[in-house]
Image (cartoon, grey):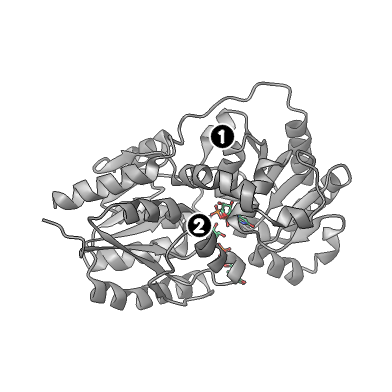
Amino acid sequence: MSTKNEKIISVVGARPQFIKSAPVSHAFRKSSRYQEILVHTGQHYDKNMSETFFDELDMNPPAYNLGTGSGSHAEQTAEIMRRLEPVLLKEKPRLLIVYGDTNSTLAGALTASKLHIPIAHIESGLRSFNRMMPEEINRIVTDHISNLLFCPTKQAVLNLSSEGIKKNVFYCGDVMFDSALEFSVKSEQKSTSHNRLTVEKNGYVLATVHRAENTDNRQRLSNILHALVKVACDLPVILPLHPRTRKMIRHFALEDCLEGISVIEPLGYLDMLYYEKNASLIITDSGGIQKEAYFCRVPCVTLRDETEWVETLDAHWNVLADADSIESINEQIHATLTFPGIRLNIDEYGDGRASIKIVQEVERYLDNL
Ligand code: UD1
Ligand code: UDP
């Protein structure tokens, strides 16, 4: 029989993981059976990449912050593992939860698996089929060592099945949809930064760029910035700049390519939802923002060669633009702004109760262990 003294550890570390874990933490808080201990790896550490989200999303501060910080893939992954292991040995959790596909995800899963702690992977089964992406390696390895696999889409279930993973696979919907629903009203009430920017509702473009394949390649980054400058001739463009991108713009001396773009600091989640909801178009290479564009019913141009969120393409809410070609980006932006067809509804992402279903399945699994 389990008691409420039994522990589950959730490992988070990067911005999207704070947003994904918030509704799951809330569901755990309501459940009296297990105590959730939040461990922050410290992969993201700037106030506006980390602390802001804990304040805004009604989350308890992490019980541990491992303070790992930035580094090469090997350094960061290894350092998280080294710092996490003693925490797992001390707390002896019955299960460890990881989210998504970052180095924090992989490091958390590897550390737990070597200590024979069962692992639940939330946002399991996504595939880009591009092994040059660090995230693709992180997902594949994490899925293959996880005991419970929570899939946000039916396609994710099929992807796992084709790799032979069929046991304890649950299609539960997307926890990011839970968050978007949960914080939608609050974002209308509490978002404040739009007061500081003079943009008309449905009269601007919101853009984000941070993916390694775009930021670490001068030509691709320059193409993206030039395309944004071109759009900015017709519509204001707001670009909350990820620290990685800021660093690389400086590194490649591309500061002059930001002329006419409203470059701002990374936004909090409530402000971000507000800007997403009221944009005419979103241009991004973010996984989460592609979906949020759909949740807000705003068309999206994704600056990537492929996406894991294929449903958004099928439903015509999203198109891919090859950042190797400035013409391709310009064409896709123009086509999206002038799209003559019908955009479809996607029922894949669930009913906003993915987190509740996940907590129930975790409890059932542990009861039967
Ligand atoms: C990471 C994830 C990526 C995810 C993204 C979300 C990996 C391999 N990548 O990418 O999948 O989409 O988070 O935003 O895990 N930096 C700061 N301050 C911070 C954080 C980062 O200045 O608080 C700068 C540092 O220069 C750092 C760089 O950004 O070297 C990259 O950070 P890192 O966490 O390694 O990867 P992301 O690009 O953020
Ligand atoms: N986000 C935010 N402020 C920003 C940019 C993004 O709150 O300035 C949120 C966004 O709404 C989404 C999540 O961060 O919920 C996406 O994270 P990111 O783009 O960093 O990573 P990815 O989803 O690509 O892994």
Q: In which quarter of the image is the N terminus?
A: bottom left
The answer to whether 122 is drawn above or below residue 58 in the figure is above
In terms of image quarters, where does ligand 1 lie? bottom right
Q: What's the distance in space between the residues labelled 1 and 2, CA to CA?
A: 26 Å
Nearer to the camera, 303 or 357: 357
Secondary structure beneath dot 1 equals: helix
Q: In the displayed structure, does residue 17 sit left or right of residue 186?
A: left
State which quadrant residue 64 falls in: bottom left
Amino acid on which disc 2 is placed: Leu
Which residue occupies 82% across, 47% down?
236
Q: Name the residue under label 1.
A: 312
Task: Answer above or below: position of 29 versus 47.
Answer: above
> Which comes before the other along the chain, label 1 or label 2?
2
Q: Does the residue at mark 1 contact the one at mark 2 (Cβ under 8 Å)?
A: no
Residue found at x 82% / y 55%:
261
Question: Residue lying farthest left?
Answer: 1
Q: Quadrant of residue 247?
A: bottom right
Circle 2 residue: 57
Q: Which of label 1 and label 2 is nearer to you?
A: 2
Going by the numbered disc 1, the residue's amino acid type is Thr
Q: Name the residue rendered at 56%, 44% in the picture.
A: 184
Secondary structure, mark 2, is loop
Above or below 79: residue 365? above
Q: Does the residue labelled 2 lie within 8 Å of ligand 2?
A: no
Residue occupying the point 30% across, 48% down: 359
Q: Which of these two is toward me, 270 or 118? A: 270
Q: Which of 233 and 313 is in front in this view?
A: 233
Expressed as whole percent of the image width and height from the top left, the position of residue 251 reads 73, 71
Q: Is residue 146 visible?
A: yes
48 over 177 or under it: above or below: below
Q: Furthest-right residue in view?
A: 233
The picture places residue 51, in percent across and down from the top left corner, at: 54, 68
